[in-house]
Amino acid sequence: MGLFDFLKKGKEEPAKQPTGTPRTNQMPGQPTQGTTASPNQQHVNAKSTDTYTVQSGDSLSKIAQRQYGSASSWTKIYDANKTIIGDNPDLIKPGQKLTIPRD
């Protein structure tokens, strides 16, 4: 299309995307962005846990008392965070981010 053809025609239409092919800005070889979980799964996962950052002077029983209303529920927190806490549930450190199960 020459310059004069453009002026005669007016504005140029963008190229049409073939039907059934999603248009993305994804670079070749990069993973697809987004999530594969259904909206229902996302809702369940979002509501079933919270995150708590350990403060100086905290213990699992103190955190359980504040979060659940029962200090004896500390095992729920420990079981969900064994990889972070380690083998000794009495040894938690300020700054650790713990998952608080809400089930």
Image (cartoon, rainbow, N blue to C red):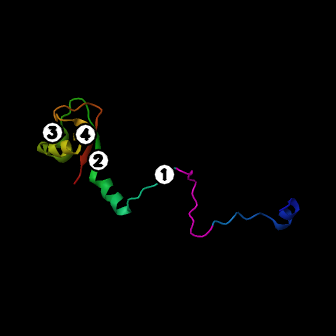
Relative to the observer, which residue lies in front, 43 or 20? 20
> Which residue was labeled with disc 2?
50
- Mark 3 lies on a secondary structure that is helix
| Among the two numbered marks 1 and 2 on one chain, the one whose residue lies closer to the N terminus | 1
Assess whether residue 24 is covered by the magenta stretch. Answer: yes
> Which residue was labeled with disc 3?
61
Q: CA distance from mark 3 to mark 1?
A: 42 Å
> Which residue was labeled with disc 4?
83
Contact (Cβ within 8 Å) of mark 4 with mark 1: no
- Amino acid carrying label 2: it is Asp
Contact (Cβ within 8 Å) of mark 4 with mark 2: no
Q: Residues within 10 Å of mark 4 (few under 14, many from 20)?
A: few
The number of discs equals 4
In the rendered image, residue 47, in percent from the top left (x then y), is placed at: 30, 54
Magenta range is: 18-29
Contact (Cβ within 8 Å) of mark 3 with mark 2: no
| Among the two numbered marks 3 and 1 on one chain, the one whose residue lies closer to the N terminus | 1
> Which residue was labeled with disc 1?
31
State the residue at coordinates (14%, 45%): 73
- Amino acid carrying label 3: it is Ser
| Among the two numbered marks 4 and 2 on one chain, the one whose residue lies closer to the N terminus | 2
Say if residue 50 shows up in the picture.
yes
State the residue at coordinates (26%, 32%): 55
> Which residue sits furthest right?
4
In the rendered image, residue 84, in percent from the top left (x then y), is placed at: 26, 37
Above or below — where is 5 with respect to 62? below
- Mark 2 lies on a secondary structure that is strand
